[in-house]
Image (cartoon, grey):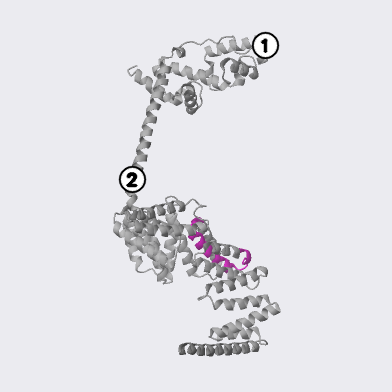
Amino acid sequence: MNFKKGNNFYLIILLILCFCEHLQSQKVADSLKNVSYDYMWERYYADTTRAAKIIYTDAIIARTKKEGDTATLMGGYELRSYLYRKNNRDKYLSYLDSIIKLGELKPINGYPEDKLLERGVDFYLNNDLKNALLDFIKIEDFGKNNTNLIRRNYNHLGLVKYELGDKFGALESYFKSLDMLKRESNSSQKSYLILYFNISNIYNETGKLDSAQYYINEGIRISQELNDTLYYNHFIANKGINLFYKEDYERANEILKKCLDSVQSEEVKAHINYYLGTINKKIGKFEQSLKHYLIVDSIISKINVLNPFYRKTYIELINHYKSKKELKSQFYYLNKLINMDSINHENEVFLNRNLYTDYEIPKLKAERNQIIFNIKQKDRKKMIWIIVLLVGSILILSGFIYQYYKRKSYQTRFLTLYNNQENDQKKEVPTNIKKPSYQLDISEEIIVHILEGLQKFEKNHDYLRAELTLPNLAKQLQTNSKYLSKVISAKKGKNFVQYINNLRVNYAIKKLKNNLSFRKYTLVAIANEIGFKKSESFTNAFKKETGITPFYFIKELQKKHPNS
């Protein structure tokens, strides 16, 4: 009971202190009503306490809202945003949002482009690549007169595009920045190092190895002139990567191993370890390879990088543990890969560019579900195998049965063709028709004329002409296409194409049976010989007429006459 009373006492004291502080703050705020903005700006930077800085920014924001001073209001929001940049990202972004909205309505004094760049960098560092890209693109609409900012923005655009997998788009942005840098009178050599490193990196990864080597050499030269060991080591690492792509694995391995201890960037270390892992895999040192891939995973997990370049590391780890049948490790890295691909998928990169080959997101999820199933359902494994074997056996047996009856059916059709002497006899075209002439709306004299013409047409094998069409046959028979089509349909029970294909196929059958040389032709040559322009058309027509393919027919003929 006394404890509760003690608590109440301290609570009352705390409330009194807070109230006093509020009164003091209000007193300070009231005292700032008539002072200049310059004074408050000066006091903001001079006073080291957070509470005082809040009071000054509150006063600036309140007065500028009342007076409608948009430019100074944006300045007040900017000062306030600094207070939350390191410890409260949501508030920090909310003040940047306010500045950008005001600046878009009334661009002034570098607003909103400066803050678009600042917010875009924050999005980039927090892997919100889609929003980062939107901010960097917007800058071009507002900062056209600020060439230095536009140049720096191209650098950031390149970084985001590279992270999104658009390497050629990134390269384009880097070269725009490089062109602007060359036109600056007081350009920094350090700016060249940043660009040359990024450009050489992309050229390495896209196979432009000579171009990569040029920018690597330039980077090494400038970094030596500036005595910049940081970038010097980065360029040496890129030199090793360049040798890797040239398949000089021994030198690449030697250079990259030396670079590991000298580079400072964690992401560059991740890159180096990936290449060392791949080199060791190629030369058969699989344990060393695994060690480097695990280091890559450790680094990118620590710095929260989702660059699609690193998904190859997870594929290697998944495949390694899959081969070792270590399901839990396989499942662990499969989840990491799914997470990486899912985030990139939300950024509309991977699916739009068809970069997924071995591990599309749905496939990954299906494989993950299968692993979960295997872990939880080991007791049912034998039953699953029995079912699989049973279904497989049924499918195989069904396939054998189907093939047996198919071969039997083909054999029967072949024998029918082979023994059918009608194909070897001359077929006369009778002059009587199935329909009376008055039903065809054609005079009997014309019908007889057409039939006699068809008889001569068949006798002379004119149907073997590849250029044969209904109109030119009608012209040959001195009639018109309409009459000819009606007579063929009534007499043969076929349309014109079916009638010609039937004549050609029967001719081919007869010639294949009786002519050894013709039997040795290719299907293309046979098709051309009997009037078909394509072997596929001949095969389709032959199968439609006979139920078997010409290839099968010829093969069976050769069995019947092996020595002929």
Q: Position of residue 61 (x, y in %)?
A: 64, 79
Q: Residue at x 45, y 12 (%)?
A: 424
Q: The residue tagged with tag 1: helix, strand or loop?
A: loop
Q: Which residues are magenta?
A: 140-168
**Rendered position, 520 above or below 214:** above
Q: Residue at x 38, y 62 (%)?
A: 296
Residue 145 in the magenta stretch? The answer is yes
Estimate how packed mark 2 is, as few (under 14), some (14 to 19) or many (20 or more) residues with alpha carbons within 10 Å: few
The three-letter amino acid code for the residue at tag 2 is Trp
Q: Is residue 435 left or right of residue 240?
A: right
Q: Position of residue 93 (x, y in %)?
A: 56, 71
Closer-to-camera residue (518/59) = 59
The residue carrying mark 1 is 443
The label on residue 385 is 2
Helix, strand or loop: magenta stretch: helix
Q: Position of residue 74 (x, y in %)?
A: 63, 75
Residue 164 in the magenta stretch? The answer is yes
Q: Is residue 370 visible?
A: yes
